[in-house]
Amino acid sequence: MKSTIMKHSKTILLGVLAIGISAFWQSCKKETKVETKYVQDPLIESVIVPNSEIAVPVNFVLDTSFNNEKSHSNVNWKSRYFDFSDTWLTGRFGEFHFVPDFPVMPNKLGGLHCPPSKGVALKNLNFNEKFPSTQFWSAGPNTQSPPCYFRFNGSDLSKNYLKFYVLTSTFCTSEPGRDGYIQCGQNYMGTQWMDSTRQVVDPTVDTAWLEAIPGSWKQQGNGYVVNCNFTFNHYLHNTAGKADGDPISKVIPVYVTYNGSFDFLTNGGPAGTLRCGFSASFSFNRSDFMDKTATKLYLKKPTTAEKANSDLAFNTNKTYGTWSGSVADLMYVNANMVFSKPHQ
């Protein structure tokens, strides 16, 4: 009896073992398919800027009596690395300013390419190693004193004014492997050089503009959305209906938020400084402003060795600069600005 039970047990055990081996063998024969699922980014409207829950105080007005504290402000960009994952490359711009809609003395408007000053602390990693004097950012005005060139009226949006620019060649990621001389980072913004030294930027195509369309400001939650003309890069002569040097402009939505204000008193007395902050965010596709097929760089003053490539670029490229695919087509820009007004 005991022997019969043992035989049955062995038979069952062998059967289970055979089924297990068969299942394992079948599972090994199957190809494993891995589907990469990236995290879906929230809409840019939903993640506009920090502190977007702060509502503008009743009757708040930022007018020409304020100034922009450029030293406490910044303009940043980010884009996915090669557009294949949620790995981001980031950077910022070294020179930017608001622009007035009324006459102003030229020396009062900053952001010009000026000779670098000795002792400037912030290094420009875009500099050409052949020219050490270019290793520092241009020495332009650090603060725009009153009148302020950005105006905001919380009670009457029709009085708002916004016109702003960055010098695209002053982008910096703080990584020499991207920022350095003839590295791929220079192509993210379509930087156009005059000659092969990569020391002199073509000033006619170095400025990106953001200009609010009057009457298009609308409140959205506690923030605001405004349609802006975004001008970035320029056409070469190979685009139908476009002359050489025509700027490339498109209308994009820009999201603006008020980030709060605070009175900083002096020595405990009534006199002090009122400070407030605003932020703005937008996104754009670089391919809307740059020729994705441009692999050779057009130079206005090429060397003899580079003339053939430059001539070919001039005859085939549709825009200035060359395309870099090491960042995604879609690029995000975020600007954070501090404004101040001294109390009398």
Image (cartoon, rainbow, N blue to C red):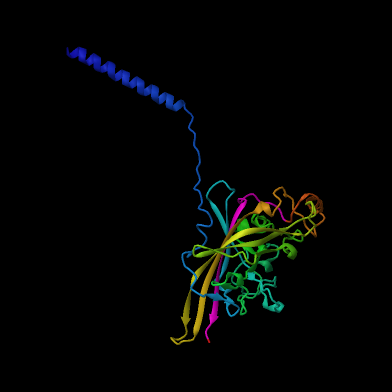
Of residues 259 and 216, the one drawn nearer to the viewer in this rendering: 216
Left or right of residue 221, residue 189 in this image: right
In the displayed orientation, state which residue is furthest to the left: 1
Residue 342 among magenta residues: yes
Provide the residue span drawn in magenta.
Answer: 321-343
- Asked if 84 appears above or below 75 in the picture, the reply is above
Q: Residue at x 59, y 71 (%)?
A: 121
- Asked if 332 appears above or below 34 in the picture, the reply is below
The answer to whether residue 43 of the structure is visible from this angle is: yes
Say how many tags the image has: 0
Q: Residue at x 43, y 86 (%)?
A: 268
* Residue 118 pos. (x, y %): 64, 75
The answer to whether residue 136 of the structure is visible from this angle is: no
Q: Quadrant of residue 94?
A: bottom right
Q: Residue at x 71, y 79 (%)?
A: 105
Of residues 245 and 87, the one drawn nearer to the viewer in this rendering: 245
Q: Residue at x 66, y 61 (%)?
A: 230
